[in-house]
Image: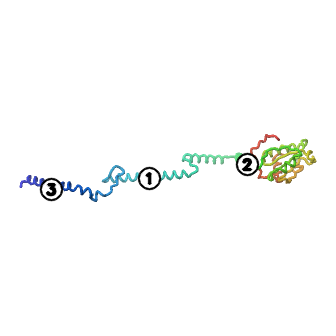
Amino acid sequence: MDPLIESMLRTSLDDDDREPTRSDESGNSDTEDSTPNQAETEITVPSQHGGAQTGPKGVLADHAHYMRKERERKAAEISAHNRRMLSRAPTTTTYREDQANKEADENSLQELENMSSDDEEEVLRRYREQRLSEIQKATLRRRTGPLFGSLREIAASQYVKSIDNEAADVSVIVHLYENEIPECRVLNECLAHLARKYISVKFLRVQAREVEFDIIGLPALLAYKNGKLIANLVKVTDEIGEREFDANVIEEILIRHDALSANEVINTQEDDSSGDE
């Protein structure tokens, strides 16, 4: 048979074979719609980066996409952790602030190393004053009793009442004096200074003749607490041993005789220029 005719016959037979298939597909369309094949029932997860990826380039793209998502997830976890930590921290600083604080500490250390002995004494003095001031403020907040702060003049008729009517924990220091005696005048100045410092202690002065006290025993200091005499320093200059003295000397004597104590409220900012009241 001629090859051309044979080829045409094969083509015609092939067309005839395909036509029933199309008819079957048309006739069975309802069945296929109601009974999908297995491949069509498989769940397909849509690609997160623009459709299915195939071939080597697709695999590389999928891997890159996965790694990017992992980095984003880890970054989100770190960010959330940092937010939780910062919310719990009482104070937070940045890296630059930490570096600035570190440099300041190093500079302070260098300054301390370069200090002379006089500078060190000044630093220690300021530190002691600061600590005393803090203690003073704390004591004032706790204390509920009276505060005085001055050396007060009383008459003989007020003597007993000024002592007996005071609270049991208040020290009362009385100076028996006469103005013509120089040591009495100096002692009045010292007591005025101490009264501004020991503001929880009651400092009084009364003229010796008004209470019929012998002036040979002047200057005299009497200290009371809870109505009882706790220090009797008649002719206090004999204990000092010298005619010239200052408030520090008198303070030491009163502490030694328990007329003053560390429990008293101390005002570290007293005004030395204040006069007697």
User: Depth-wise, is mark 3 or mark 2 nearer the camera?
Assistant: 3
Question: Do the numbered discs 3 and 1 sit on residues whose CB atoms are within 8 Å?
Answer: no
Helix, strand or loop at mark 1: helix
Q: Give the amino acid at mark 2.
A: Leu
Residue under the image location 78 percent in, 42 percent down: 272
Helix, strand or loop at mark 2: helix
Viewer-side residue, 272 vs 259: 259
Horizontally, residue 105 falls left or right of residue 167, namely left
Q: Give the amino acid at mark 1.
A: Arg
Horizontally, residue 114 falls left or right of residue 59, namely right
Please report whichever mark, 1 or 2, sits nearer to the chain's N-terminal start: 1
Please report whichever mark, 3 or 1, sits nearer to the chain's N-terminal start: 3
Image quarter in which the N terminus is found:
bottom left
Mark 1 and mark 2: Cα distance apart in space: 57 Å
Image quarter in which the C terminus is found:
top right
Mark 3 and mark 2: Cα distance apart in space: 113 Å
Question: Do the numbered discs 1 and 2 sit on residues whose CB atoms are within 8 Å?
Answer: no
Helix, strand or loop at mark 3: helix
Residue 140: which disc?
2
For label 1, the residue is 73
Badge 1: how crowded within 10 Å, few (<14), some, or many (20+)? Answer: few
Badge 2: how crowded within 10 Å, few (<14), some, or many (20+)? Answer: some
Q: Position of residue 53 (x, y in %)?
A: 32, 52
Please report whichever mark, 3 or 2, sits nearer to the chain's N-terminal start: 3
Q: Position of residue 57 (x, y in %)?
A: 32, 52
Instruction: Return the residue found at the far left.
Output: 1
Q: Position of residue 149 (x, y in %)?
A: 79, 45
Residue 259: which disc?
none
